[in-house]
Image (cartoon, coloured by chain):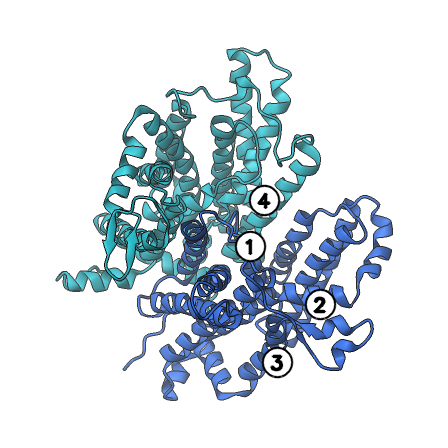
Chain colours: A cyan, B blue
Amino acid sequence: MSDWRERADASLDWLVDTSAVQRILVSLTSLAFAVLLGTVLVFVSGFVADCTDPFILLPGVGYGCYNPVEMYGTMFTGAFGSLTALGRTLQETTLLLFTGLSVAVAFRAGLFNIGTQGQLVLGALGAALTVLTLGERVPGNVLGALVVIPAGVVVGALVGGAWGAIPGVMKAYADAHEVITTIMLNFVATGIAFWAVQNHVGNLESDSVQTHAIPEIARLPASISGARFSIYALVGALAIAVAIYLLYTRTVLGYELRTSGIQETAAEYGGVNAKRNVVTSMTLSGALGGIAGAVYVMMVQYRWQAGIPALGFDGVAVSILASNNPLGVIPAALLFGGMKSGSVAVDLSLGVPNELVEVLRGLIILFIAMPEFFRALGKRAGYGAGGEAE
Amino acid sequence: MNAPTVSRRQGLALGAVLFGLFVFAFVVDGGRGLIGDVTGVVSASYLASAFRLTVPIAFAAMGGIFAEKSGVINIGLEGLLIIGAFGAVASLWGLSATPIGPNVWLAFLFAVLASTFVALLFAIVCIEFKADQIIAGLAVWLIALGFAPFASIVIWNQTNSPSVGTFSPIEIPVLSALPNVGSLFSVTPPVLLLVLAVPFSWYLLNHTPFGMWIEASGEDPKSLDTAGISVRHVRYAGVLLSGIYCGIGGAGLALNTGQFVGSGDTMVDGRGWIGLTAYLIGNYNPVNAFLASFLFAGLDALQLELQQIAGYDVSSTLVGIIPYVAVLIVLTLVGRTRMPAEAGEHYESDE
């Protein structure tokens, strides 16, 4: 008899068993293949799209609008080419660090938390309402900011953590698989937040579903002009990445959290309360998702507004690309952040829809999920058995 | 097989939905008078609209059953529906520029082919490359969620397509002329296909050798292999069926309104996930999965009718989350669903 849990463990095993070098190779190769497929998609799409100055004419096929080489060039300059571009990239990177870490914390413990998005949406709402309420009651200076901003982050973490604890409890005590529950809870979270803002806590005069704008003192100060990016948030995210790394490698709790998710029976045998640890892992994961939401409100949007971007799903890609390593999440988030901010420039100047990044996100996840693909690739390249996984 | 579990599960599902309705009655202003109006809007045209809304959910659910019973968990149903919906509208739009003209049936066929092709890729990834089925299914969803609006913008310069045309309803002779219930017998082809597909799927699974192979492939692939049937082929068949079903469901959804909406969660808007909840609640039985789908679609239709006819200010958002809450309650109270023993496991033939 096997159920989804055992299966999930087995599937994570191959990532855990392979060496660090192999994992980096797998990530980079997946990225390369995803980009290659993305390039083909862009090139082919160029023949469907209409444009005034096509870059290529293939006899019998027609005019191609999109030049992939030019596109990647624009993507790079759009991400790192100027101080403002860098600011936008770092803004995305900061948010992706939080969501990537949220997913990684759960994956490390053998739990597929696909629910970061819902935790983020509710955490964002909690943070927005907190700073809106507190903002009126504190002085409008630095001291007020020092009260309001941490309060927003803490409430975001609490709300996200509580929402993350739900699938944790359902998993630990009712054996409901967390992939299903977290995906369903994403829809529930988005629905509840939308309804609450539309009918009760939002700006009811506004035509769009949104809260009032948060006060100035609750906004994280911009570190680079022209971009809503705050170095404080980035430093905080990096510190959390290191802290989580240390938690898992240097502390007993980290060890217990990992074994409880992956080897529940073994953990219980060793005197560990595995069920409670599953809940703890999911709560921690949810809290990070909630902080991502709080930072999104206080650094980027300055209010809760319907249609929060799918940063939680980006987090899944970031975490998988990083082999769920908290430190690996840092370069993975920077890479994704660069792709996201660069794709906006690509959309503006070349007309290639920035939804391309979403396609790449899915492709990266898909490639990393295929161990046999890399083994076959390894054999082709003449590396014998191509890795000792399995 | 495990009859008590089934009835208990269904009882709970029903209880959960009724509980949801109960809560919902309080949320609506003037909830008490609601019950009277609910009975007022339940008419033949309401049922017809509920049937149309059931199409994508029930087809996704039945497709998911075939895939998972054969041993491949396909959580990419939502993505396949998106491909089906987009494929139908894009094909119809493309066809209208050719000498063939806007042939709805041909567009429908192309949509099913597109969804089946993506399902084939998913099957190759899972069966040949031994991908993790959950992650690969998630990837299918995310890729489709990005690809459909991407392609919409490339083709139409915006995430929503223009109106391209719809299926015209088929009038069933005599019955459609009946007073009151006549509108039930003026059905669109996807609804007709659904009505045929439910008993067909049930029969295929329970009363044919193919159904037995699907069952064995998920429960006990070793015996199937010993009996000389290729587990690989059966699993391919299971996944491809889910692709065909989702193609029909997605195309049926899009050709009902005649437009593809690619913004947000696209026009599919979680219906693939609701399909997944429907077959979990229906315990892998196509008929029960259909009933669960119909229940969820019926709630959706009810909400629409209440707003339009009775003038209620019903929160469509809250009605929309009822299926998800229902499945969460069922999963929590019943615990794990009785899924096929070897679902998700890769099978190595000894040959």
Q: Is residue B180 above or below residue B318?
A: below
State the residue at coordinates (62%, 27%). A212
Which residue corresponds to mark 4?
Answer: A190
Residue A183 appears in the figure: yes
Indicate the secondary structure of the residue bearing disc 2: helix
Which residue corresponds to mark 1?
Answer: B267
Whether discs 4 and 2 lie on one chain: the answer is no
Distance Cα–Cα, label 3 vs label 4: 36 Å
Which residue corresponds to mark 3?
Answer: B199
Distance Cα–Cα, label 3 vs label 2: 19 Å
Which residue corresponds to mark 2?
Answer: B48
Whether discs 1 and 4 lie on one chain: the answer is no
Number of the front mark, 4 or 2: 2
Circles 3, 2 touching at the beta carbon (< 8 Å): no
Distance Cα–Cα, label 1 vs label 3: 28 Å
Percent x, y for residue A343?
A: 35, 40
Percent x, y for residue B313?
A: 76, 45
**Label 1 or label 3, whichever comes before in sequence order:** 3
Number of marks: 4
Marked residue chain, label 1 = B
**Label 1 or label 2, whichever comes before in sequence order:** 2
